[in-house]
Amino acid sequence: MATARKYNVEAVFKGAPKKSDFKIVEETLPAIKDGEFLAEAIWLSVDPYMRLFVNSSNVGNTMFGEQVAKVIESKNENFKVGDYVAGMFGWRTKTISNGDQVRKLDRSVYTDDKLSTGLGILGMPGATAYIAFLSICAPKEGETLVVTGAAGVVGSAVGQIAKIKGCRVVGFAGSDEKVQYLKSLGFDEAINYKTMTSLKETLEKTCPKGIDMFFDNVGGEFYDTIIPQMNTSGRVAVVGCISQYNLENPEKGPRLNPSILAKELTIKGFVIYNHLPRWPEAFKAIGEWIEKGQLKYNETVTEGFDNMFDAFSGLFTGKNTGKAVVKA
Amino acid sequence: MATARKYNVEAVFKGAPKKSDFKIVEETLPAIKDGEFLAEAIWLSVDPYMRLFVNSSNVGNTMFGEQVAKVIESKNENFKVGDYVAGMFGWRTKTISNGDQVRKLDRSVYTDDKLSTGLGILGMPGATAYIAFLSICAPKEGETLVVTGAAGVVGSAVGQIAKIKGCRVVGFAGSDEKVQYLKSLGFDEAINYKTMTSLKETLEKTCPKGIDMFFDNVGGEFYDTIIPQMNTSGRVAVVGCISQYNLENPEKGPRLNPSILAKELTIKGFVIYNHLPRWPEAFKAIGEWIEKGQLKYNETVTEGFDNMFDAFSGLFTGKNTGKAVVKA
């Protein structure tokens, strides 16, 4: 019998998450049964979406989230001791799983120094960037892409994939440091939206041939302003709308149907978990681009399971660039 | 040398179009040259889309629009005297054309009593209904369609095509007469939106399995209310937004990205003139459905070229059923 440590949700967040909204508890795990395995957390993920999805039904339960873990005991022939897996095990050190919805990590790709990428560029966010951008935006050489939330793991990957496809890439982020980072990745233009004077004028200046593709992680005023400036037959991937997540009632914005109609725009929402069959294709392509030096990624590492709350809290101070991960 | 009468655009519309936004003028036409023909208007079209596309570049020029005309003089071997054609000749009685972008009407289909359908069910609106509905909404048997502006030529054709494809069809229109008309066409549900109490509750009642497809001719509150009630993977054809055309400033509505995202909706604008290669396919299919009695249509006829403005203006007061045409 093993003992796990885990974070229970103590309270629904009010404003910024507080340390007291969580409580670390110990749990004695039963012996594994046939078909099950026991895994030990190696890397844990903290993500902005977690703030949105904590509600009263989570209170008293283990905090949800993905982790990369090592199989340390097994009665499941598909998951052997020593295998590495990625799964939605939550904020906990040890987990019993039957393997359902668990992804086994190919160790020729996820080498020791790259295990954490199973939560980032070679995980859900990377798959999101690849599948949503290519399937919805359908980039053609010479076209212009605008991406919001550009310094995040999804946005920065989308911009780099667009560059690989021969597009002009304009990214928006929230600090001068992030702008520098985006420029170092090869973005044609990177703009600190917090210090620009006018989004409309910034777009006119940075997108002289108009906007063919819009990869939106933010929504709100970005969406309102960019849609009417798009070119005919433009494609819009709605992959996040972080500006709207915390609102009790939908905010109002201009009705954009006249632009959607007259310009024959295509606007499409995207939820990565509906596209599981394409994940391997995404990881293969992204892995090759990383190998060739065409796609770079960044991680903000926090050491120690006991520091998960600090890593999570850090997401909302705008300090992180790239994927935030915790080393257990 | 012939004399034509025509409507010049005098001013860009501010709010609802006014009679003084147009001026009827006379024009002396030159003799036709080799490759040209002279055509006389028989039927002229007024359409809601005209409201959207008049801008400052039109001021001083002939108002655009389609007409069915008879060739009365020709130096073009493809268009002989006595031929009937449909073309974007504008609001004018006589036109010199070189035949570019002109559709010759097959008189075995467009018989004397059906010439006006070249502007309606067997013209641009019919092609719109067929191509936009099938390509964007991609109907599957048993799915539910909501169509707004359902009593118009496009909406009523879309509903009937959806019935042919085995779908449940719910249509909204603006009078009890129109509701009766839609029921006579086989719509499963037809609702007078002017007398209903709550759109949301009406949708819940008439769409017990949710909404898979939304064919929108109206926009505004319909769009705002229907989008959040759509099923996962729903498809939305934005083909008109008549509620927004006469507004001087874009109206505000709730920002709908959270629904678009979470339900992976596809929203697509549609402009029929970008789909010319598919028109013949549309007319063939629609012609066969009419022949078999599976698809019916209706027209509102205004007599007299001098009454074109009234016919146009009538589009926005909700008086018409089916295609609005003017008999020259």
Image (cartoon, coloured by chain):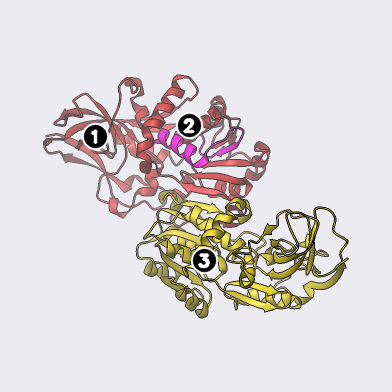
Chain colours: A yellow, B red
Q: Gap in Å between the C-alphas at discs 1 and 3?
A: 58 Å
Q: Is residue A230 left or right of residue B193?
A: left
Q: Secondary structure at mark 2?
A: helix
Q: Quadrant of residue B283?
A: top left
Query: Looking at the image, which residue is at 18% across and 27% down?
Result: B72
Query: Looking at the image, which residue is at 83% across and 65% down?
Result: A60
Q: In the image, is residue B136 part of the stretch drawn in magenta?
A: yes
Quarter of the figure that contains the C terminus of chain B: top left
- Both labels 1 and 3 in a single chain: no
Where is A156 relative to B183, above or below?
below
**Among the two numbered marks 1 and 2 on one chain, the one whose residue lies closer to the N terminus:** 1
- Both labels 3 and 2 in a single chain: no
The residue labelled by disc 2 is: B157
Residue A252 percent location from the top left of the image: 57, 60
Q: In the image, is residue A206 part of the stretch drawn in magenta?
A: no
Query: Looking at the image, which residue is at 59% across and 55% down?
Result: A279
- Mark 1–mark 2 CB contact (< 8 Å): no
Q: Which mark is residue B93?
A: 1
The residue labelled by disc 3 is: A157
- Mark 3–mark 2 CB contact (< 8 Å): no
Q: Chain of mark 3?
A: A
Residue B79 percent location from the top left of the image: 20, 29
In depth, the one of A204 and B170 nearer the eye is A204
Where is B85 relative to A68, above or below?
above
Residue range highlighted in magenta: B124-153
Residue A136 percent location from the top left of the image: 50, 53
In depth, the one of A269 and B47 nearer the eye is A269
The type of residue carrying mark 1 is Thr
Q: Is residue A254 visible?
A: no
Q: Residues within 10 Å of mark 3 (few under 14, many from 20)?
A: many
